[in-house]
Amino acid sequence: MSGTESFPEIREAVRKLCAQFPGEYWREHDRERSYPKEFVAALTEAGFLSVLIPEAYGGSGLGLAAATAVLEEIHRSGCNGGACHAQMYTMGTILKHGSEAQKQTYLPKIASGELRLQAFGVTEPTAGTDTTRISTFARRDGDHYVITGQKLWISRAEHSDLMVLLCRTMAREDAAKPSDGMSVLIVDLREAVGAGLTIRPVRTMLNHATTELFFDGLRVPAANLVGEEGKGFRYILDGMNAERILIASECIGDGRFFVDRASKYATEREVFGRPIGQNQGVQFPIARAHVQVTAASLMVDKAAAMFDAGLPCGTEANMAKMLASEASWFAADTAIQTHGGFGFAEDYDIERKFRETRLYQVAPISTNLILSHVGTHVLGMPKSF
Ligand SMILES: Cc1cc2nc3c(=O)[nH]c(=O)nc-3n(C[C@H](O)[C@H](O)[C@H](O)COP(=O)(O)OP(=O)(O)OC[C@H]3O[C@@H](n4cnc5c(N)ncnc54)[C@H](O)[C@@H]3O)c2cc1C
């Protein structure tokens, strides 16, 4: 560890906690596709999931840079924050755009872990990345909204008490702009399941507790509307910067995990009478992976610092996520290659982390969409959509 790393005490405490959850723990949950609830409970109890909640609402209010240190260390330790990272940032929509009553009702309980708000419902099967095409609709009926529609890839819905849901409250064709007419509702999943909401797990190549949601006349109190009706798209976009920066920090942690493992293995494994890492054909890709992870980590630090300073950071958050997810993927591929056949053996945890880190070039936003943002918004080239 370098002496210049940020938040050394937090990192040390996270590493200590993670040491209680070694590879076997993750392999078993991965095999069963079960939820690592003991790990989530330990992180909650230690207060690591409430670092973004201001002290006034019971959190530690340390900010995004501290949160990136937590997630990076979790991933560097071989653990996976995907089970609960959204508990850190999903509440940002309420913190930034909710009423004081909503903040008082939810934030202290989210900070203590009494309430889980770690489901974030945006993606739909037919709309895909084109969020303005979502069709899940919330129709006002007295002091309730009645929701009908479908969501896909909604992670942790079965392990969350609340969900922040984006839906249409006005049809796209009736709205002044395609991004108008969408609203954010807080859905209490404990009451909703079986009363108009059905959750179906979707099995994927990694253990991510993701699901499909079916809404069939679910009634949600109008008091659960966040901010103004019709302005929800903007609220969701706001929250996405934090999400992208935090996911990027997980990729940095993954990248460091792969570089740590690969360099150690390359030093110890002897073939042809010498360590394989003595061969530059093996050594250089690992060194290159380290260079790429280190560079990406600077971008993550910059984006987090801008976020914490309250500056617009959409471009930096996107660039950090893209660089970090590509660096971790290169490191993952290099670690597999370095380990030869053992890279494919479950017991080494390389193949599991390889599957896990691949997600982040697709979710929460895919690389092409980031390139399109940079190409058009930053460089002023013509839009393709
Ligand atoms: C495991 C997992 C967990 C997830 N968790 C959540 C969650 O909790 N909540 C949630 O709301 N969503 C979640 N998602 C959804 C995720 O954000 C989307 O999968 C992602 O944004 C990509 O959208 P899509 O799958 O609809 O792909 P599509 O939009 O169908 O795109 C498919 C491919 O085409 C490319 N593409 C599309 N249009 C263009 C274009 N105009 N130009 C160039 N390339 C283009 C995309 O970059 C992508 O590579 C999750 C997904 C997964 C796999």
Image (cartoon, rainbow, N blue to C red):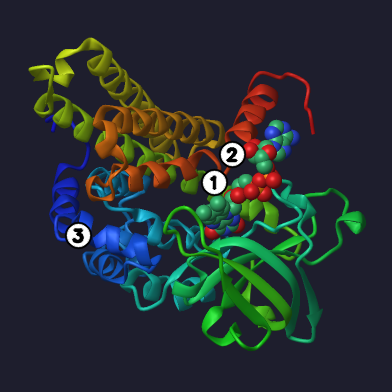
From the top left corner, tell me how far across and down residue 58 is, in percent: 32, 69
| Quadrant where the image shows the C terminus | top right
Which sits earlier in the primary sequence, circle 3 or circle 1?
3
Q: Residue at x 9, y 17 (%)?
A: 274
Distance from the alpha carbon under mark 2 to that under mark 3: 30 Å
Helix or strand or loop: what does disc 2 sit on? Answer: loop
Q: Amino acid at mark 1?
A: Ala
Distance from the alpha carbon under mark 1 to that under mark 2: 6 Å
Question: Does the beta carbon at disc 2 come under 8 Å from ligand 1?
Answer: yes
User: Can residue 363 be seen by looking at this rendering?
Assistant: yes
Helix or strand or loop: what does disc 1 sit on? Answer: loop
**Of residues 345 and 65, the one drawn nearer to the viewer in this rendering:** 345
Q: Which residue is mark 1?
A: 363
Residue 20: which quarter of the image? bottom left
Report whether 212 appears left or right of 2: right
- How many residues crowd mark 3 within 10 Å: few (<14), some (14–19), many (20+)? some
Q: Which residue is mark 2?
A: 366
Q: Which mark is residue 21?
A: 3
Question: Does the beta carbon at disc 1 come under 8 Å from ligand 1?
Answer: yes
